[in-house]
Image (cartoon, grey):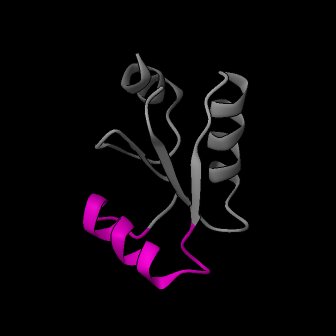
């Protein structure tokens, strides 16, 4: 199974949607809340160049925002 990291914040509806989508597809992921960990926030910006969430890292493929099609493509 591919390693999935999702960078989130507590009250982000798109983060919640992305997590629900991954769960519904049977994928496990590591959640990194960038509100609670500055190192994770810096890591997210380094990988994506973005300050907005969600940022999803699937084996080095970076997806900014919630896009079911992009997520599915990266997981296939």
At a point 66% along the width and 42% down the height, the residue shown is: 19
Residue 40 is inside the magenta segment: yes
At a point 54% along the width and 80% down the height, the residue shown is: 37
Q: How far from the left and from the top, in percent, is residue 67? A: 49, 34
Relative to 34, does residue 16 appear above or below in the rendering? above
Range shown magenta: 33-51
At a point 70% along the width and 54% down the height, the residue shown is: 13
Relative side of 36 to 5, left or right: right
Residue 67 is inside the magenta segment: no
Relative to 32, does residue 34 appear above or below in the rendering? below
Q: How far from the left and from the top, in percent, is residue 48? A: 29, 58
Quarter of the image for residue 28 reads: top right
Q: How far from the left and from the top, in percent, is residue 26? A: 67, 23
Quarter of the image for residue 39 reads: bottom left
Relative side of 64 to 7, left or right: left
Closest to the observer, 8 or 52: 8
For the C terminus, the quadrant is top left
- Residue lying farthest top? 76
How many labels sit on residues? 0
Relative side of 42 to 67, left or right: left
Closest to the observer, 60 or 21: 60
At a point 52% along the width and 51% down the height, the residue shown is: 6
Q: How far from the left and from the top, in percent, is residue 30? A: 57, 51
């Amino acid at each position: 199974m591919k390693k999935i990291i999702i960078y989130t914040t507590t009250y982000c509806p798109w983060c919640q949607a992305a997590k629900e989508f991954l769960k519904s597809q049977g994928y496990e992921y590591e959640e990194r809340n960038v509100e609670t960990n500055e190192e994770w926030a810096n890591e997210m910006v380094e990988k994506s160049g973005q300050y907005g969430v969600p940022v999803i890292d699937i084996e080095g493929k970076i997806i900014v925002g919630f896009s079911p099609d992009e997520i599915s493509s990266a997981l296939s």
